[in-house]
């Protein structure tokens, strides 16, 4: 039985920018047997989303957003450590993943990377604020099947289209499958720019990557 009170307190700790408390509660819930992704989805993602909403409505300001993001990053690290390590025997595919140029949001991308690794994929995490050209170069050099990009700003979503264009103009579009994600990104956007897949969250990302590799 998961302690609902603890779960609520964990969510509240991120909202209240209390990193130590958030980490402590995350550890406690994990040690009580809660699944890491469940904890993420039930407490911490709703917490940071609420913070983002309040920021968007001018109810709190950048320093507070930064503090909450710091707490979120810390609990993400704790949860990522709890996920099973990469299983080479299950190795089923190779991906590069990056947050696009001009965008420093990487909490979601790091969750995606961890869950992909836990599912046996080899993931090369290129980091955040990554040039389109660098993403293409690394995809070629590392000979991956899939390129995943994350964009959290409406302005940086355009870099996902740049990637499609760069692959086409390089004559290598057919060599890779592409998957896009990030809060403002939609299936419609993916279709519009010609990406091969869209995923709303990390779990769906794993499913989509499996489909892309199979097809
Ligand atoms: C945390 C945060 C920050 C942190 C980021 C810290 C970090 N290391 O990531 C900091 C404080 C640095 C920050 C900065 C800024 N931010 Co900010 N931020 C957020 C916030 C609150 C949460 C984002 C987050 O981590 N969510 C939790 C994760 C788990 O969710 P996620 O990223 O969506 O990822 C999930 C899925 O989308 C999916 N996914 C994501 N990527 C990928 C990739 C693939 C391949 C796949 C398959 C799936 C996938 O899976 C993930 C896990 O389930 C959002 C609000 C929001 N609701 O998104 C605003 C938000 C994105 N930020 C915003 C803004 C405006 C900014 C700033 C411009 C503020 C400023 N004035 O400086 C700067 C931009 C800096 C820059 N150039 O990038 C706006 C964007 C508005 C817009 N229309 O574009 C938002 C929406 C807040 C708001 N309501 O106004 N921010």
Image (tube, helix red, strand yellow):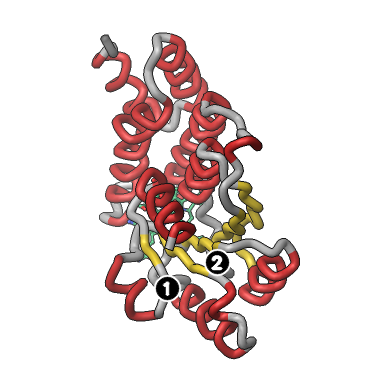
- Looking at the image, is mark 1 or mark 2 earlier in the sequence? 2
Q: Where on the image, by quarter, is ligand 1?
A: bottom left
Image-based side of 77 in relation to 154, left or right: right
The front one of 133 and 194 is 194
Q: Is residue 196 above or below residue 56?
A: below
Using a 10 Å C-alpha cutoff, classify the residue at mark 2 as few (fewer than 14 neighbours), some (14 to 19) or many (20 or more).
many
**Is the shortest distance between ligand 1 and the CB of mark 2 under 8 Å?**
no
Q: Is residue 52 above or below residue 193?
A: above
Which residue was labeled with disc 1?
Answer: 195
Whether residue 16 appears in this view of the structure is no
Q: How many marks?
A: 2
Task: Indicate the position of residue 7 as horizontal and vertical percent values.
Answer: 31, 20
As helix, strand or loop, the secondary structure at mark 2 comes to: strand
Residue 145 found in image quarter: bottom right
Q: Please tell me the numbered disc located at residue 67.
A: none
Task: Indicate the position of residue 12 as horizontal and vertical percent values.
Answer: 32, 27
Q: Looking at the image, which residue is at 37% across and 18% down? A: 34
Task: Indicate the position of residue 142 as horizontal and vertical percent values.
Answer: 72, 61
The front one of 112 and 40 is 112
Q: Looking at the image, which residue is at 45% across and 55% down? A: 209
Q: CA gap, disc 1 to disc 2?
A: 15 Å
Which residue was labeled with disc 2?
Answer: 100
As helix, strand or loop, the secondary structure at mark 1 comes to: loop
Q: Please identify the residue farthest to the right as the structure is shown.
A: 141
């Amino acid at each position: 039985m998961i302690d609902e009170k603890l779960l609520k307190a964990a969510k509240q700790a991120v909202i209240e920018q209390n990193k130590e408390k958030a980490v402590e509660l995350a550890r406690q819930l994990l040690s009580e047997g809660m699944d890491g992704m469940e904890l993420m989805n039930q407490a911490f993602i709703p917490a940071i989303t609420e913070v983002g909403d309040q920021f968007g409505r001018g109810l709190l300001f950048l320093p507070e957003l930064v503090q909450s993001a710091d707490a979120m990053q810390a609990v993400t690290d704790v949860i990522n450590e709890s996920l099973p390590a990469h299983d080479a025997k299950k190795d089923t595919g190779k991906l590069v993943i990056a947050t696009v140029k001009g965008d420093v949001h990487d909490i979601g991308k790091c969750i995606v990377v961890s869950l992909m690794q836990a599912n046996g994929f080899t993931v090369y995490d290129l980091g955040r604020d990554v040039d389109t050209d660098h993403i293409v170069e690394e995809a070629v050099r590392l000979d991956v099947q899939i390129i995943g990009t994350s964009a959290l700003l409406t302005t940086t979503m355009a870099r996902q289209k740049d990637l499609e264009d760069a692959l086409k103009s390089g004559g290598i579009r057919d060599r890779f499958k592409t998957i896009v994600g990030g809060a403002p990104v939609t299936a419609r956007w993916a279709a519009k720019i010609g990406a091969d897949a869209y995923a709303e969250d990390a779990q769906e990302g794993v499913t989509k990557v499996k489909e892309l590799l199979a097809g």
